[in-house]
Image (cartoon, rainbow, N blue to C red):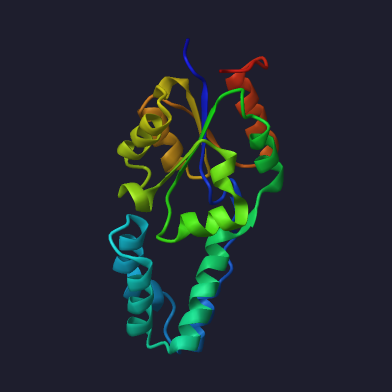
Amino acid sequence: MTTTCVILDIGGVLEITPETGWLRRWEERLELPPGAVDERMHDVWRAGSVGRISEHDVQWEVASRLGLDVHQLEAFTADLWAEYLGTPNEELIAYVRGLRGRCRLGILSNSFVGARERETALYRFDELVEHIVYSHEIGIEKPDLRAFEAACARLDVQPESCLFVDDAVANVEAARTVGMKAHLFEDNTRTIARIEAHLGPVRTIA
């Protein structure tokens, strides 16, 4: 019998992550033009998202490239993670928690070095699902098809049995390309309804 599976994104789905404008505020504080921080840090952000740099080295590069002292670096890092982590989508998290036993559950997230430790401490996503596949740990970001294949392999499920939920159109389309069913997250009500339709009548799995 095919095992039904639900795989979710984190940022914009399980976490509510509106833009806070923190980078522009830092650019103003440092008297830099708009976009200067991302321009200087682009390769570091990219390396951090696929695990090619340590969190310690990210901080060293930030301080060096932006000319931050120890206190500024601490404040910059705090602002970065405040936007990254957002706030928990409590309604959806509670719903997903109630799915345990009805289906396999996983997370597939584009991420950054340090994300697992912080999200585990704040939101206990490790207790919400069976496996979390982070881009910085596998070295591959969505919408690369290999990221979806990695998530299926980790959960030991076939793509055709999975519903993938993400807030980015490109990722939803990529999931469909590998054979998954996919849902574009817009709100909790429609997402929960789509998951219920995927799972069908309530039943338990071993």
Residue 134 visible in the shown view? yes
Residue 55 is situated, as x and y percent measured from the top left of the image, at 38, 67
| Image point (56%, 24%), residue name | 103
Query: In the image, is residue 58 above or below residue 120?
Result: below
- What residue sits 58% from the left and 42% below the top? 127
Residue 192 image-quadrant placement: top right
Residue 190 seen from this side? no
Vertical placement of residue 92 versus 23, above or below: above
Front in this rendered view, residue 206 or 52: 206
- Nearer to us in this view, 127 or 137: 127
Q: How many marks?
A: 0
Q: Is residue 166 above or below residue 103?
A: below
The x, y position of residue 102, in whole percent, is: 61, 22
* Image spot of residue 77 (x, y percent): 49, 74
* Residue depicted at x 34% and y 32%: 149
Q: Residue at x 38, y 44 (%)?
A: 142
Indicate the position of residue 126 as horizontal and vertical percent values.
Answer: 54, 45
The residue most toward the top is 1
Residue toward you, 89 or 94:
94
Q: Is residue 188 left or right of residue 140?
A: right
Picture quarter with the C terminus: top right
